[in-house]
Amino acid sequence: MNILAAVDFSPVTDAVLATLGRIGTLSAVKVHLVHVAPPEPDFVGYAPGPDVVRGQVAAELRTQHQRLQELADRLRAGSIEATALLLQGPTVD
């Protein structure tokens, strides 16, 4: 069974992982963790954009990627096959 789980690193994320862990003990599952990061500001990536903003965006994406990988590692430690995918796009508050 494949399960797609969207995570936002809010307090409910731990409950999502706990539920996935319980499901994983009942049957063989493959979990796909997805986190959507906000899109870059329009000026990032262009020469006129401030370097400090580009650096901040890159640092935030690295941190989110690391956190997502840590969540997948927690599932793998429980013998659950897990992949993690960080996407950028429109997000919901």
Image (cartoon, rainbow, N blue to C red):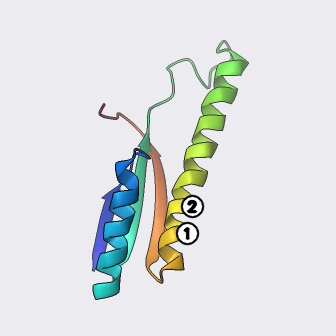
Q: Is residue 27 visible?
A: no
**Which residue, as the protein is rendered here, is positioned at the far top?**
48
Which x, y percent locates residue 41? 50, 22
Going by the numbered disc 1, the residue's amino acid type is Asp
- Please tell me how crowded label 2 is: few (under 14), some (14-19), or many (20+) other residues with Cα within 10 Å: few
Is residue 25 found left or right of 71 in the rendered image?
left
Q: How many marks?
A: 2
Given residues 73 and 19, the one toward you in this image is: 19
The residue sitting at 47% across, 57% down in the picture is 85
Secondary element at image label 2: helix
Other residues around mark 1 within 10 Å, as few (<14) / some (14–19) / many (≥20): some
Residue 29, image x and y in percent? 34, 81
Compared across the picture, whether 74 is left or right of 80 comes to: right
Q: Are marks 1 and 2 in contact (CB under 8 Å)?
A: yes
Residue 23 quadrant: bottom left
The vertical placement of 35 against 30, above or below, is: above
Three-letter code for the amino acid on which mark 2 is drawn: Glu
Residue at 34%, 80% (x, y): give it.
24
Residue linked to disc 1: 73
The quadrant in which the N terminus is found is bottom left
Rendered-image quadrant of the C terminus = top left
Rendered view: 10 above or below 17: above
The percent coordinates of residue 57 (x first, y second) are 60, 30
Residue under the point 50% across and 66% down: 72
Is 48 drawn above or below residue 39 in the view shown? above
Q: Is residue 18 left or right of residue 86?
A: left
Q: Residue 25 in the image: x percent, y percent? A: 34, 85
Question: Could you say whether the residue bearing mark 1 is in a helix, strand or loop?
Answer: helix
Q: Residue at x 31, y 68 (%)?
A: 19
What residue is disc 2 on? Answer: 70
Could you give the CA–CA distance between mark 1 and mark 2, rounded to whole angstroms? 5 Å
